[in-house]
Image: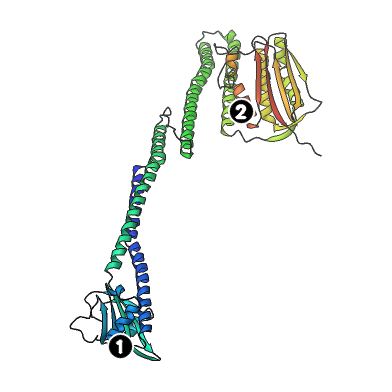
């Protein structure tokens, strides 16, 4: 997020504030004026209609009689700031009461046309050019039977109406200003709780993009923005761990490749320059072959682990007999067991035990666990492989009687390239990838693998698998 976005937000807020104030002054003024005019004109029309009805039988030429009628109706005082005229059909003003007097130079109202007032009975004008300023004028006919004897004209100044309109608009404007001022508090709250945290998140993302993964975004909120900042911190932490792992990976893989490559190169050059005599070539060619096989296994293990990282979920699940797989895998290690005088004891659940998993990958798990058990078992000891069914799952256990694992090493045995022995492991040919591959395979199956070990006594690994679905 760039600062221009915040500037646009402020500009939009200011525009809305100006628009609100402008609408209060213009539209508010118009609506208030129209409402006041409606009330004032309605009252004036009612007055004119009442007076016209009272004068229907009075001689219009008798101003005294007209005054008596208006006084009896209690209306005379209401015309102190307005005017009441009695006009004959030809436009001659017969009687005028109040402040709106007939100008001295007007004897007859020219172009007098009461029909121009329409159905409303009032208009705002200069009353056929009689006055120099506009005012509110109302006309009501004085009738006697079907004939029109004259007209009652009521004139009211708009000064008081406009003053009332301006007073009410001022009140609305002050309220609008107060509303805008209060809304500034929400703007301040937005700035403190949204904009500034977003700036910190933006700064954090820029730091992360530059490779500064040690930077941490300050999290002070327990909301969506705080969650986003916390998530980005976790992401940076994981990326930092990934970079550290990558550096460690390069260092470890370089170390593990360097040793066999050095042996292969050294023995090959020694045979080529005659340092190793021809009669001893077979011995060193055997060593070279073994080192080359070690490089092949290390490369394959690295590729297997990389494949697990890329797509651990792509499993080829089938139903197969885990007991049969255990028997076949144990048979592969007969030679290794014979050399160390080890016994493999199989305690299997039934003759067949069907599970649902990726057969090739589970075979790799069994191979790695049994290979480790043989490497770290004491001579003349027993390795026990057991299958059992618990909580509607299959459990496979591989237990040896060997050197065991120290407590401080248990949490790290799953780390890639980690070897328990400080001098690069009891088995120097191992790459430290076997257990990491095992855990990734079991995790890909959605299962768990646990280890129990006592130093000097032995180690037991146990993992779970889904049972095959049985047909009903």
Q: Name the residue nearer the viewer: 196 or 23.
A: 23
Which residue ends up furthest to the left in the rendered image? 105
- Vertical side of 255 occupied by 61: above or below: below
Q: Residues within 10 Å of mark 1 (few under 14, many from 20)?
A: many
The reply, left or right, for residue 374 in relation to residue 414 is: right
Q: Nearer the viewer, residue 301 or 121?
A: 121
* Residue beneath the point at 70% across and 30% down: 359
Picture coordinates of residue 236 (x, y %)? 46, 31
Q: Which mark is residue 60?
A: 1
Question: Label 2 crowding class (10 Å Cα cut-off): few <14, some 14-19, many 20+?
Answer: some
Residue at image x 57%, y 14%?
408
Choose mark 2 or mark 1, whichever is in front. 1
Q: Quadrant of residue 300?
A: top right
Name the residue that disc number 2 marks: 440
Where residue 304 appears, as percent x and y from the top left, is: 59, 28
Q: Earlier in the sequence, mark 2 or mark 1?
A: 1
Q: Which mark is residue 354?
A: none
Which quadrant would the N terminus be assigned to in this image? top left
- Which quadrant is home to the C terminus? top right
* Inter-mark Cα distance, 2 to 1: 113 Å
Of 452 and 103, nearer the camera is: 103
Colour convention of the picture: rainbow
Give the residue at x 28% y 70%: 158
Whether residue 1 is visible to the viewer of this picture, yes or no, is no
Q: Measuring from the top left, give residue 96's x and y in whole percent.
A: 26, 81
Whether residue 162 is situated above or below residue 149 in the rendered picture:
above
User: In what element is the residue under mark 1?
Assistant: loop
Q: Are marks 2 and 1 in contact (CB under 8 Å)?
A: no
Q: Quadrant of residue 217?
A: top left
Viewer can see residue 143 = yes
SS at badge 2: helix
């Amino acid at each position: 997020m760039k600062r221009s976005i915040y500037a646009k937000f402020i500009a939009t807020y200011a525009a809305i504030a100006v628009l609100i104030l402008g609408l209060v002054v213009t539209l508010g003024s118009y609506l208030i004026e129209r409402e006041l005019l409606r009330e004032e004109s309605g009252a004036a029309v009612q007055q004119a209609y009442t007076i016209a009805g009272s004068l229907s039988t009075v001689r219009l030429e008798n101003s005294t009689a007209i005054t008596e009628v208006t006084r009896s109706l209690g209306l005379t005082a209401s015309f102190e700031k307005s005017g009441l005229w009695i006009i004959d059909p030809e436009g001659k003003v017969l009687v005028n009461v109040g402040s709106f007097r007939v100008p001295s130079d007007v004897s007859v109202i020219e172009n007098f046309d009461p029909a121009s007032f329409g159905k409303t009975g009032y208009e705002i004008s200069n009353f056929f050019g009689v006055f120099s300023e506009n005012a509110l004028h109302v006309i009501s006919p004085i009738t006697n039977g079907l004939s029109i004897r004259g007209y009652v004209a009521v004139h009211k100044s708009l000064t008081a109406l406009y003053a009332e309109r301006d007073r009410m608009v001022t009140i609305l404007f002050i309220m609008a200003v107060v509303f805008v001022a209060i809304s500034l508090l929400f703007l301040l709250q937005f700035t403190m709780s949204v904009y500034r945290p977003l700036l910190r998140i933006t700064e954090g993302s820029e730091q992360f993009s530059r490779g500064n993964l040690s930077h941490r975004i300050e999290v002070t909120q327990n909301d969506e923005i705080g969650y986003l900042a916390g998530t980005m911190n976790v992401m940076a932490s994981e990326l930092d761990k990934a970079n550290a792992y990558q550096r460690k990976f390069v260092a470890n893989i370089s170390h593990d490749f360097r040793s066999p490559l050095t042996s292969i190169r050294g023995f090959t050059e020694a045979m080529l320059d005659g340092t190793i005599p021809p009669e001893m070539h077979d011995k060193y060619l055997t060593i070279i072959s073994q080192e080359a096989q070690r490089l092949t296994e290390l490369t394959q293990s690295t590729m297997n682990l990389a494949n697990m990282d890329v797509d651990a979920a792509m499993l080829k699940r089938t139903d197969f007999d885990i007991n049969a797989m255990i028997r076949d895998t144990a048979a592969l290690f007969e030679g290794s067991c014979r050399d160390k005088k080890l016994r493999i004891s199989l305690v299997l659940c039934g003759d067949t035990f069907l599970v649902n998993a990726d057969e090739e990958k589970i075979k790799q798990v069994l191979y790695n666990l049994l290979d480790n058990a043989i490497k770290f078992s004491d001579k003349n000891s027993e390795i026990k492989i057991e299958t059992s069914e618990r909580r509607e799952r299959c459990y496979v256990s591989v237990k040896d009687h060997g050197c065991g694992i120290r407590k401080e090493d248990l949490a790290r045995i799953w780390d890639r390239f980690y070897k328990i022995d400080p001098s690069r492991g009891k088995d120097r040919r191992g790459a430290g990838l076997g257990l990491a591959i095992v855990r990734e395979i079991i995790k890909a199956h959605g299962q768990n693998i646990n280890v129990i070990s006592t130093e000097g006594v032995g180690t037991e690994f146990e993992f779970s698998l889904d049972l095959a679905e049985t047909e009903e």
